[in-house]
Structure formats: structure tokens, C-alpha cells
């Protein structure tokens, strides 16, 4: 139980059936505190802690990483949402 806990979480958030409002969020947390988060609508990392601000500044300099994360809306979110949604709708 003692120690440190670091984790990385990816979320796809949407409310319409055509996925037009789909947003990809990528959060890096330490001990249950979100340090930094990428938001595909904003198009960059935002820091929420002192350390997270430093992470965000460094991550935002890497344009290849930013472009890859922006693409996750289509390659990860929409792709999987279509599969998950159709499997749920087919069950009802």
C-alpha cells in the first residue's frame, strides 16, 4: 500500500450518434492527481500541477506527438466507438 502510483489514461468522450462531437483525452496522473492532459479539441497538452506544466511545455514541442494524438480521435475513438455502439445496439 505504501509507494507511488503513476498511470496513463485515454478517454473518448462523445454524446451524438454520428460522433461529430468526439473528443480524445489523454491524462497522465501521479498519486490520483492529474498532472497533464491532452485534449484533441484544444490540440495540445495542458498542465494542472507545477510538474504538469513543465511536462506540457515539453510535450507540446514535439509536433509529431501532437499530430499523432490528434489523429487518435479517428484511429482510436471513432473506430472503437462504432464497434462498441453497434454491439450494444444489437443486444437490445
Image: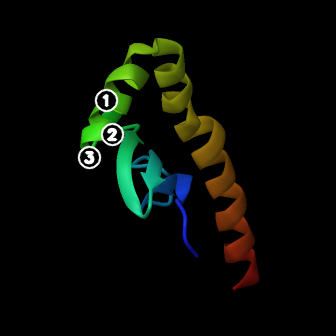
Could one spot residue 65 in this view of the protein? Answer: yes
Q: Residues within 10 Å of mark 1 (few under 14, many from 20)?
A: some
Residue of label 2? 52
Q: How far apart are the alpha carbons under marks 3 and 2?
A: 6 Å
Front residue of this view, candidates 7 and 37:
7
Circle 3 SS class = loop
In the displayed structure, 62 sits above or below 11; it is above
Horizontal placement of 7 versus 46: left or right? Answer: right
Circle 1 SS class = helix
| Marks 3, 1: nearer the viewer | 1
Residue of label 1? 54
Q: Position of residue 74 (x, y in %)?
A: 58, 37
Q: Position of residue 55 (x, y in %)?
A: 38, 31
User: Marks 2 and 1: CB-CB under 8 Å?
Assistant: yes
How many dots with numbers?
3
Residue of label 3? 48
Q: Position of residue 12 (x, y in %)?
A: 51, 54
In the displayed structure, 33 sits above or below 27; it is below
Query: What residue sits 69% from the left and 64% below the top?
Result: 84
In the displayed structure, 70 sits above or below 87; it is above
Q: How far apart are the alpha carbons under marks 3 and 1?
A: 10 Å
Circle 2 SS class = helix
The image quarter containing residue 16 is bottom left
User: Marks 3 and 2: CB-CB under 8 Å?
Assistant: yes
Q: Residue furthest bottom?
A: 92
Amino acid at each position: 500500500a505504501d509507494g507511488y502510483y503513476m498511470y496513463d489514461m485515454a478517454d473518448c468522450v462523445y454524446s451524438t450518434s454520428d460522433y461529430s462531437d468526439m473528443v480524445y483525452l489523454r491524462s497522465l496522473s501521479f498519486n490520483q492527481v492529474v498532472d497533464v492532459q491532452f485534449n484533441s479539441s484544444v490540440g495540445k497538452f495542458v498542465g494542472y500541477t507545477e510538474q504538469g506544466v513543465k511536462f506540457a511545455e515539453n510535450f507540446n514541442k514535439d509536433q509529431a506527438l501532437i499530430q499523432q494524438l490528434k489523429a487518435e480521435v479517428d484511429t482510436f475513438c471513432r473506430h472503437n466507438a462504432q464497434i462498441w455502439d453497434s454491439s450494444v445496439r444489437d443486444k437490445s
